[in-house]
């Protein structure tokens, strides 16, 4: 009798315990080249950029739409409020007042207020790095608190990219109630504490970090939107690309950061891995500096553009995963206009133009490249092969990555013919045109200069009316394409490799997935 | 007395040697081409910001001045701060040293455990079947690139057969590491009595240690064999055989005579295999000094690279010193000759 009762009680207790046991946390395991050594978007270290967007969210975000395949993607034409609920713009376009969402809490239990926004922007201004650049490029002069939940941005001039800039992860918005407790007189912005801690209002927060091993992120229990699928993300350092691929193939990890593109094409047919691609925003092109002969002659630049068989380059270098580049503005950016592109593959026309410019037998030039990105070398080899057919001997010359970077600095820019991987992180045509082709653009490495173009771009950036802006942008693209400062080739697609059970990836222009979007179908 | 004199003489050479090594590393790393300033400044930096960062890092001073400052700091025990992790390099290195040492010594230990007897046996019956096989395996070990070997072992034993754990570090991600005493998960988990951690650490050690063992066994087999063959054809053995001593006794004599040269050789091997160990660490995401050093080199983290090389140099010096000391203790006759 006693026996049976004991067994019965034990069984009941076990069942009760089992029922009371909480469900196991959903964990996403990511294999990446390196654990980030810092979590401050303004003090970039290797790996920082991958994780900061998960932790720090901003006032606005891009809207979403579904493409014809039913896949969810960003809609660069719509900007919606994120941490901000709504905003007003003054008539002259120089003052924005944001009304913050109330009740937005950080993992530390502190509420988002205007003080947080002001402090965060002042930190970026003071550090004079990426955050400051973004502020300058969007004409932000100052940020001030209006009331507990209202914050005002004062611009030096109207800016059409200001709202876009607010979608970026930097300047990040910090939970200053928490951060300030770690600030000292020597370290007023608590930068030291930010080496291995985070305090944001985003979907995830840093739980712990073991250098060279892994960083553990947990979902923000107080996140203002619906909770994400994954409660925990283990960001594991696996330096060898081959090892990362093996781990993904064997199901030990569900996502790899920085998949080795050479492997991607092979892995694409493997059922154990899901490879997703999206249009890229960095163009594969060869830049010609008009300050050096023979590239000072527009006909020569156009001739080289006629000499290129773009589809062949896409097929051989990118194994078909690319789109023909028809504008310096990437395909999916609102305002992309391919109508000015007229350089079909026409070697005869190329030779004719060269002869007209005074080079009937072609010419010799060095084509510089580096190892900074995987397709630079194969592209250069293909391109020089095609150019040889019209009499232009482009000798591929490899230089170091740091050499390439220092020679493209604004004060130097001494490379007549070179290739570089460069793409805008703000999905705005005005921003793109300014960055890459305005005479003062930071990434205008080929020193292209056209006053009419500059004027149009400046007007586009200052105009808030979308139709007017798109008209300026269209004219600017036409001028640029006619001037042909680049031998335009293709936009290589970007890839992410993940386990087949993972879904929900939405491409973001900063090339970092958002863990919030991801789900698993186990 | 003799030993003290011997030690003092040795130590006087070490300081200039280390200074020389640090000098070369210092210059190479700065002239080598990896520029950390660009990386730290980010893609949107202006020239002014780049200059400011250069100034913060002290890179705008003339090279020799920079070196002088660095040397003075090192003499006081300050190896500088890593620009990537912003932690003192000394701390970074000390934290990772036991991890790498564990791998290195276990690997070479296994390699020597297998290689020395193999070489000795091969020398005892030269050109016999055992000798042929041992030499063939040794040749294989010489020819196989480390990186490739590590990846292949991982692929075969983890991916295909499922026998080994994934190459994802020193311990399973689901296991909580033991509290740090020595820095080696294996030793620490035994000390803590945590058998789950011990099993996990041991399991994760197998493949990397075997990789290093295979690579290190090759030269050990070859050299042991060469040393032993020479002794076998030498006076001592000839006399022993003439006296009619049994084979086992002869082998003991050979072993005794071979100890010193083999020891010296293994010492050299240890220092030579640090590079191999670094690659193995890379493949298995081990998180030790080698991975740290490789990361530092790739990212142009000057202070960390210098600290890494200095640590390796110091390690080599210590190994050589220990080996020499052991040799002196085993064969006091040699002291005057050195």
Image (spheres, grey):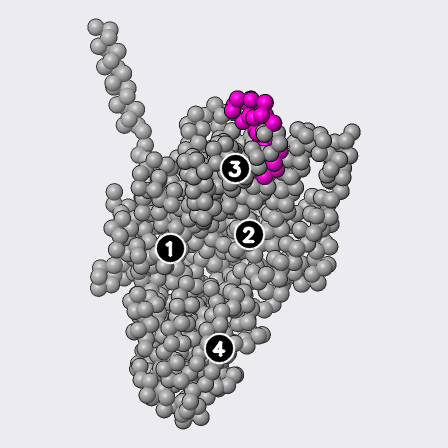
Which residue, as the protein is rendered here, is positioned at the far top?
A1
Q: Quadrant of residue B315?
A: top right
Spatial CA span between label 3 and label 2: 39 Å
Position of the C terminus of chain A, as image quadrant, is: top left
Q: Is residue A442 visible?
A: yes
Spatial CA span between label 1 and label 4: 31 Å
For disc 2, the marked residue is B296
Is the Cβ of the residue at disc 1 closer than 8 Å to that at disc 3?
Answer: no
Question: Residue A361, how many percent across, how many down?
Answer: 42, 89
Q: Marks 3 and 4: same chain?
A: no
For disc 4, the marked residue is A366
Q: Earlier along the polypeptide chain: callout 3 or callout 2?
A: 3
Q: Marks 2 and 4: same chain?
A: no
Q: Residue at x 59, y 41 (%)?
A: B268
Q: Residue at x 41, y 52 (%)?
A: A241
For disc 3, the marked residue is B225
| Chain holding disc 2 | B
């Amino acid at each position: 009798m006693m026996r049976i009762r004991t067994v019965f009680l034990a069984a009941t207790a076990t069942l009760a315990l089992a029922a009371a046991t909480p469900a196991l946390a959903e964990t996403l395991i990511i294999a990446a080249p390196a654990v980030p050594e810092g979590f401050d978007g303004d003090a970039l270290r290797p790996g920082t950029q991958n994780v900061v967007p998960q932790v720090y969210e901003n006032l606005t975000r891009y809207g979403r739409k579904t493409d014809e395949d039913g896949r969810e993607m960003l809609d660069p034409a719509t900007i919606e409020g994120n941490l901000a609920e709504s905003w007003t713009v003054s008539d002259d376009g120089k003052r924005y007042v944001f009304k913050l969402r109330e009740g937005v809490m950080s993992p530390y239990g502190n509420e988002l207020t205007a003080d947080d926004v002001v402090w965060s922007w002042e930190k970026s201004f003071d550090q004079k790095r990426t955050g400051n650049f973004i502020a300058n490029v969007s004409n932000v002069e100052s940020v001030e608190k209006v009331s507990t939940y209202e914050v005002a941005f004062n611009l030096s001039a109207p800016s059409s990219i200001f709202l876009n800039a607010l979608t970026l992860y930097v300047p990040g918005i910090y939970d200053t109630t928490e951060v300030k407790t770690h600030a000292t007189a020597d370290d007023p912005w608590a930068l030291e504490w930010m080496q291995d801690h985070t305090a944001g209002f985003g979907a995830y927060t840093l739980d712990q970090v073991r250098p060279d091993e892994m960083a553990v992120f947990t979902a923000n229990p107080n996140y203002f939107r619906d909770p994400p699928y994954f409660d925990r993300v283990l960001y594991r350092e696996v330096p060898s690309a081959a090892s990362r691929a093996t781990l993904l193939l064997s199901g030990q990890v569900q996502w790899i950061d920085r998949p080795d593109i050479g492997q991607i094409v092979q892995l694409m047919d493997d059922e154990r891995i899901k490879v997703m691609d999206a249009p890229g925003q960095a163009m594969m092109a060869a830049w010609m500096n008009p300050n050096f002969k023979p590239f000072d002659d527009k006909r020569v630049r156009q001739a080289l553009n006629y000499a290129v068989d773009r589809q062949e380059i896409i097929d051989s270098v990118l194994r078909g995963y690319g789109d023909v580049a028809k504008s310096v503005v990437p395909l999916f950016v609102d305002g992309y206009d391919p109508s000015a592109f007229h350089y079909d593959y026409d070697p005869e026309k190329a030779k004719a133009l060269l002869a007209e410019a005074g080079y009937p037998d072609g010419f010799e030039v060095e084509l510089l490249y580096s190892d900074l990105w995987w397709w630079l070398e194969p592209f250069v080899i293909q391109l020089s092969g095609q150019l040889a057919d019209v009499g232009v001997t482009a000798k591929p010359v490899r230089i170091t990555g740091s050499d390439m970077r220092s020679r493209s600095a604004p004060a130097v820019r001494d490379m007549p013919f070179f290739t570089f991987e460069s793409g805008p992180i703000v999905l705005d045509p005005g921003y793109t045109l300014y960055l890459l082709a305005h005479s003062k653009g930071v990434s205008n490495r080929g020193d292209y200069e056209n006053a009419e173009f500059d004027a149009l771009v400046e007007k586009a950036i200052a105009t808030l009316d979308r139709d007017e802006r798109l008209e300026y942008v269209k004219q600017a693209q036409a001028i640029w394409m006619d001037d042909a400062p680049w031998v335009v080739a293709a936009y290589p697609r970007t890839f992410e490799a993940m386990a087949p059970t993972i879904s929900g990836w939405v491409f973001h222009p900063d090339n970092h997935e958002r863990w919030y979007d991801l789900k698993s179908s186990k | 007395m003799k030993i003290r004199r011997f030690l003092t003489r040795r130590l006087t050479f070490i300081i200039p040697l280390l200074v020389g090594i640090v000098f070369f590393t210092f210059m190479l790393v700065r002239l080598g081409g990896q520029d950390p300033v660009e990386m730290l400044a980010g893609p949107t930096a202006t020239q002014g910001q780049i200059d400011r960062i250069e100034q913060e890092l002290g890179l705008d001073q003339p090279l020799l001045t920079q070196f002088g400052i660095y040397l003075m700091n090192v003499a006081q025990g300050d190896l500088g701060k890593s620009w990537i992790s912003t932690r003192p390099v000394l701390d970074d290195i000390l934290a990772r040293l036991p991890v790498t040492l564990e791998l290195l010594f276990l690997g070479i230990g296994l390699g020597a455990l297998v290689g020395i007897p193999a070489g000795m046996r091969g020398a005892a019956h030269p050109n016999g079947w055992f000798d042929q096989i041992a030499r063939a395996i040794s040749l294989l070990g010489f020819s196989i690139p480390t990186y490739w070997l590590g990846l292949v072992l991982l692929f075969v034993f983890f991916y295909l057969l499922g026998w080994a754990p994934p190459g994802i570090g020193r311990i399973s991600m689901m296991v909580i590491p033991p509290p740090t005493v020595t820095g080696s998960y294996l030793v620490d988990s035994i000390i803590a009595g945590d058998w789950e951690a011990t099993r996990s650490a041991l399991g994760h050690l197998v493949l990397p240690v075997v990789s290093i063992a295979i690579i290190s066994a090759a030269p050990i087999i070859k050299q042991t064999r060469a040393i032993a063959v020479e002794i076998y054809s030498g006076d001592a053995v000839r006399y022993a055989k003439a006296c009619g001593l049994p084979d086992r006794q002869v082998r003991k004599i050979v072993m005794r005579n071979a100890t010193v040269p083999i020891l010296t050789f293994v010492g050299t091997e240890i220092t030579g295999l640090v590079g191999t160990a670094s690659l193995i660490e890379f493949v298995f995401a081990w998180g030790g000094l080698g991975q740290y050093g490789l990361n530092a080199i790739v990212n142009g983290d000057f202070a960390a690279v210098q600290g890494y090389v200095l640590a390796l140099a110091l390690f080599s010096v210590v190994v050589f010193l220990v080996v020499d000391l052991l040799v002196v203790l085993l064969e006091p006759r040699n002291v005057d000759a050195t």
